[in-house]
Image (tube, rainbow, N blue to C red):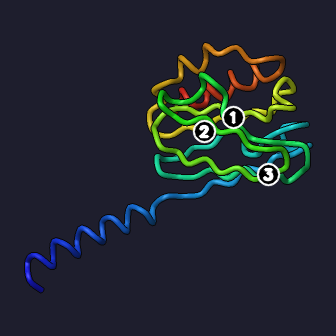
């Protein structure tokens, strides 16, 4: 093989290999799960930049959306419709707060981490209603411990 072809082949293999590394994480939106009522399972997702997280409406009357102030700077907000699958592509390192809007106060929240939790303190500073504040605090503690 000629040197130029070898370089192109190596570059293609590296690019394709990187694309193949991306994972898809699946989160169920449930009325009842291991952690109680109105939950995402799992509620804590360790991802990598480039991964996708698919929120599946296993039970009805749920959505998944990012929480303002709980995503890395420059991240586009995601708002899923009720009873619809939502796919979030992780494009930056940091923490991503997710909620089910109808059940936010009941604590239906999740946290995605990718790489360094660069926006963790900003995310912690966002006020959340009811039980969501407690659960988010526990999930942010998990993110900090990584």
Closest to the camera, between mark 2 and mark 3, is 3
In depth, the one of 43 and 146 nearer the eye is 43
Where is mark 2, residue-wise? Answer: 112
Give 88 or 115, whichever is nearer the viewer: 88
Counting from the top left corner in percent of width and height, residue 80 is at 74, 43
Q: Which residue is mark 3?
A: 84
Tell which circle, 3 or 1, labels the residue nearer the N-terminal end.
3
Secondary structure of the residue carrying numbered label 3:
loop
- Label 2 – label 3 distance at C-alpha: 19 Å
Q: Earlier in the sequence, mark 2 or mark 1?
A: 1
Residue 113, quarter of the rendered image: top right
Mark nearer the viewer, 3 or 1: 3
Residue pictured at 52% horizontal, 52% vertical:
51
Q: Which residue is mark 1?
A: 98
User: Which residue appears at 63% of the width and 54% of the height?
Assistant: 25
- Which one is nearer the viewer's eye here, 68 or 22? 68
């Amino acid at each position: 093989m000629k040197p130029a072809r070898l370089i192109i082949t190596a570059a293609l293999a590296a690019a394709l290999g990187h694309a193949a590394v991306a994972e898809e994480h699946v989160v169920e939106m449930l009325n009842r799960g291991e952690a109680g009522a109105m939950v995402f399972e799992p509620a804590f997702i360790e991802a990598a930049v480039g991964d996708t997280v698919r929120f599946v409406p296993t039970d009805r009357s749920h959505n998944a959306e990012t929480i303002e102030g709980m995503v890395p700077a420059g991240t586009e907000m995601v708002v899923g419709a009720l009873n619809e699958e939502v796919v979030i592509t992780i494009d930056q390192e940091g923490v991503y707060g997710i909620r089910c809007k109808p059940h936010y106060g009941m604590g239906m929240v999740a946290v995605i981490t990718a790489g360094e939790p660069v926006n963790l303190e900003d995310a912690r500073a966002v006020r959340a209603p009811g039980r969501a504040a407690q659960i988010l605090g526990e999930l942010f503690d998990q993110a900090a411990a990584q």
